[in-house]
């Protein structure tokens, strides 16, 4: 389980800051979401360092003023459809539909993919070591060795197809 510090950093005009918040502005303090920067404050300074001290920093931006922070963040995410070229170039990930909920979906997909990768590795090692042990005892033949090689690869690919189905 990963614990995360969630903070809203807004470098835009004060009137735009509520629209940039991850949670409803009135519910954010109650949910433990600190406001690491005040609207109108450049986010490339102290607020970003404050959040980064607590672990990894993921930053979402779309403007030319966001490019330095996108480049320095551990994970820079640019909103690509209406974002500036500088932000897109500096980011690690570009969301092409400008929907911030795509970040949550990408995290969900990546966790599912990692789980499938670990399953495939564990299954392949289990079958290969079992075949090795059976071969050392003189029980395994060439066909079992072929299955341990090619068959496991086919089963791993079929298992990986599960990653294509992601619920909305």
Image (spheres, rainbow, N blue to C red):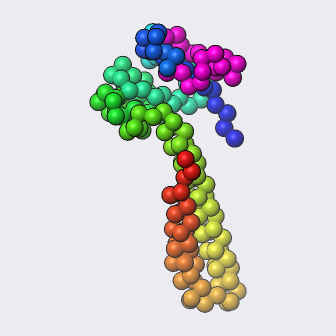
Q: Nearer the viewer, residue 165 or 34?
A: 165
Check residue 54 for magenta coloring.
no
Q: Nearer the viewer, residue 111 or 143?
A: 111
- Look at the image and tell me in which quarter the N terminus lies: top right
Residue 125: percent from the left, percent from the top?
Answer: 62, 68
Magenta part of the chain: 20-39
Q: Which of 71 and 115 is in front in this view?
A: 115
- Which percent across, then down, holds residue 152? 56, 74
Main SS of residues in magenta: loop
Residue 109 percent across, percent down from the top left: 54, 49
| Residue 3 visible in the snapshot | yes
64 versus 164 height, above or below: above
Task: Give me the residue at 53% from left, 69% from top.
Answer: 158
* Residue 41 appears in the rendering: no
- The residue depicted at 66 percent of the width and 19 percent of the height is 27
Please report the residue visible at 52 percent of the width from the left and 10 percent of the height from the top.
38
Asked which quadrant contains residue 23, the reply is: top right
Q: Is residue 24 positioned above or below 91 on the image?
A: above
In the rendered structure, does residue 26 fall within the stretch colored magenta?
yes
Q: How many labels does the image show?
A: 0
Most extreme residue toward the left, as rendered? 85
The residue lying at 31 percent from left, 27 percent from top is 84
Left or right of residue 99, residue 85 in this image: left
Identify the image quadrant of residue 126.
bottom right
Q: Where is residue 88 in the image (x, y as percent from the top left)?
A: 34, 33
The answer to whether residue 3 is left or right of residue 48 is right
The answer to whether 54 is drawn above or below residue 2 in the figure is: above
């Amino acid at each position: 389980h990963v614990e995360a510090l969630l903070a809203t950093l807004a470098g835009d005009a004060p009137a735009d800051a509520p629209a940039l918040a991850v949670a409803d502005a009135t519910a954010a303090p109650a949910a433990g979401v600190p406001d690491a920067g005040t609207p109108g404050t450049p986010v490339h300074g102290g607020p970003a360092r404050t959040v980064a001290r607590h672990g990894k920093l993921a930053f979402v931006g779309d403007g030319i003023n966001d490019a330095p922070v996108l480049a320095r963040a551990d994970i820079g995410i640019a909103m690509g459809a209406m974002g500036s070229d500088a932000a897109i170039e500096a980011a690690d990930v570009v969301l092409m539909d400008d929907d911030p909920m795509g970040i949550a979906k990408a995290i969900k997909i990546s966790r599912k993919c990692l789980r499938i990768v670990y399953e495939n590795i564990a299954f392949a090692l289990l079958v290969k070591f079992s075949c090795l042990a059976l071969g050392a005892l003189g029980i395994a033949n060439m066909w079992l060795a072929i299955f341990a090689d090619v068959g496991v690869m086919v089963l791993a690919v079929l298992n990986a197809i599960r990653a294509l189905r992601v619920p909305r």
